[in-house]
Image: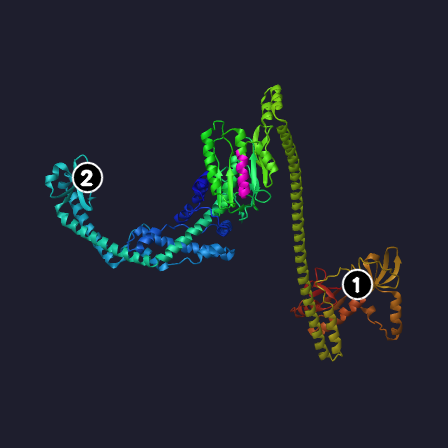
Amino acid sequence: MDHKILHTMDYNKIIHKLSAHAATPLGKAVIEQLKPSPDLDIVKHSLQATDEAYKADRLKGSPPFRGIANIEMSLKRARIGGTLNPAELLEIAETIRAGRRVKKHVLQLHDADPIPLLADIAEPLSEHKPTEDAILACIDENAEVLDHASPELAAVRRELRNGESRIREKLEQMIRSSSVQKMLQDAIITLRNDRYVIPVKSEYRSNFGGIVHDQSSSGATMFIEPEVIVSMNNKLRELRANEEREIEKVLQKLTALTADVSEDLLFDAEGLGALDFAFAKARLAHEMRASLPRMNDRGFLKLKRGRHPLLAAEAVVPIDVELGNSFSAIIVTGPNTGGKTVSLKTVGLLSLMAMSGLFIPAEDGSQMCVFDAIYADIGDEQSIEQNLSTFSSHLTNIIRILKAMTPKSLVLLDELGAGTDPAEGSALAIAILEHIHKLDSRIIATTHYSELKAYAYNRKGVINASMEFDVATLSPTYRLLVGVPGRSNAFAIAERLGLPKAIIEHARGEVSEEDTRVENMIASLEEDRLGAENERNTAEALRRELEELRAKHEAERERFEEQRDKLLRKAQDDAREAVRKAKAEAEQIIADLRKLALEEGASVKEHKLIEARRRLDDATPELHRPKPAGGNRGSKPVRIEPGDEVRVYSLNQKGSVIELAGSEALVQLGIMKMKVSLDDLELLKSSEATAKQQQPKQAASLKRTRDENATMELDLRGASLDEALIEADRFLDEAFLAGFGRVHLIHGKGTGVLRTGIQDFLRRHKHVKSYRLGQYGEGGAGVTVAELN
């Protein structure tokens, strides 16, 4: 891509913003080399990496890039035999450690939400921990070689510290002496040329033997190394030289380790730079509120509310542009400072960003094209002072563009034909546009010439566009209107500013009839556009409202279905539990009956027990197709007559109808008679069916002999548990047949064995609905009160 075009489109400013988001020197180096690519596959790959980083950064944040340095030059020097200094080795160790953290972070993100491209970059990163540990074991965080880097270095430094201590002790003895203190400028010990000295007043120089190493700027102080420590300082210098040699050996050893893995580390540096580059693009996209464009190489471009990325988001006016489908050229007209140049630069810069793998500040669904090149002739000179030299400059640039462009190029021309005679300029502009259009390049051109409006109107594949202008406020709105040519607003502006009406009417008379028709046509088109836009906005508002209602309805339906399923599952679980308990109790009852038959010699038939179990199994409710509660309640009314056998819903009891009284019936329930609403009755068997069924069985009917003697109390005190259970079973049967709703079983307090056994028996008895201990006045804990079904 031509460097001049990148500069014209302010591409370098986007690169600068992107570089500010890079976390490492490696990422910044990649960004500095970034250029738009004309290869569709490369662009799609780069955009996919940006998209993966965008999602990962939004969900989990960026990887921990801290500590990564640009180690490329250090590694190359290590490979050719150079010795790295401690700071360079420390940077290599920290980069290895940071690379391991980044790799772990990216692979964890990939496991949680696949990011295959970034994972492919992170997966092969090496983890040379032995090299890292070796460096960090010898060099501290301040890039100083540690004493234990080698035994020899530790010994030398130990001697060095001892020597320094002896020198300091000797000098401190001297400066504490009263005879010496008067000769000193200050009672301190200092260093000059790595040798210990003391500051002596210049007039006492002759009183000291030794070596003068320095003097103050005023000459009043001499820094003297006393003769008594000269040999000691010489020894220190030898030890420091030995220290340097040992440090050099350590550094050479570490450099050799680094050189052995330098190829892997160079590969790692490239991968870490690529990862940092991807996440920098993601952070820039977040900052710009940008979106992923769909890419093609068909010359098709569709911007939805595209924004210039270098303008303030709250001030920029989005534009909608479509190019390369129904038309390949757009001619934009409109007033100065109306936003034509900004629109051109927006299209050009967003195309360059997309071709560089960057998200663009536009709505989702925008499509961008991969062009082999973008050419632009955009000048800032937009005043009447334009002269022949300006025209020549623009024309020279256009000639260069015409020679280089191809059918896969995008050409942006600002103020085409300006700077010369209007008649000649418009004719030249039409000829240039026609040449570019025949080559099938994509072109967007701005102009003031009305002749180009007619050209665009009559030429297939070319469309007019304009920058909207509000005559009421005499200011542009900066909205790009594709399909509508720009109007000349000179007369409207002049009238609003107060120019006499007579002058304006005279000016209108000077305009040709053809121009007047064109202006009227444009006015009509604009009126139709505004009407259509208002209707579209209304329709859009209705559509959004309907979508909100539909979304709300769907949410309510889903919530209802979820609640219904939840209740159904609970009901099924409750039903299963109830059936399980009922079966368990039934099995226990059957077992007790068998035991009783064996103990008492009663003739309880096995087939009857099997039949009873089958009836219990058949009573299992259909959990997936529950029937309405209440049997036939709510179904078609059935006529009930006296003598019919019925069920009372509210009491869940069977009885027979004695007589009818309007909407009520007198029903015999055991020994009780009560009035019940007809709606509360279910017909079980009509009186005629009952009579037919009972007639042949009259000879075999049973007669109860105990009804008149049935009581509501049973005294079990003094009986054994087995005797009490047999007696209680008989008593409950008689009480049930007698229609008692409640009975009292007196078992006394005693040891509690009889009470526990009786209550355990009641819990499993088929006629017992519930039971409790007696209350005050009923016998307390000595009595159990049972409620019967």
Work out which quarter of the rendered image holds the N terminus and state it: top left
Residue at mark 1: 653
How would you rate the neighbour count of disc 2 (Cα within 10 Å): few for under 14, some for 14-19, many for 20 or more? some
Please state the extent of the stretch shown in magenta in the rendering: 428-443
Residue 475 lies in quadrant: top right
Q: Amino acid at mark 2?
A: Asp
> Which secondary structure is most common in the magenta stretch?
helix
Q: Splitting the image into 4 quarters, where does residue 187 fall?
A: top left
Query: Where residue 112 sits: x, y (%)?
Result: 51, 56
Locate residue 687: give its quadrant.
bottom right
| Circle number at residue 144 | none
Horizontal side, residue 684 vs residue 30: left or right: right
Q: Indicate the colouring scheme.
A: rainbow
Give whichever of discs 1 and 2 has the lower sequence position. 2
Q: Kindly identify the amino acid type of the residue bearing the numbered disc 1.
A: Gln
Q: Are marks 1 and 2 in contact (CB under 8 Å)?
A: no
Rendered residue at 65%/48% (across/down):
551
Q: Is residue 358 visible?
A: no
Q: Is residue 402 magenta?
A: no
Say how many tags the image has. 2
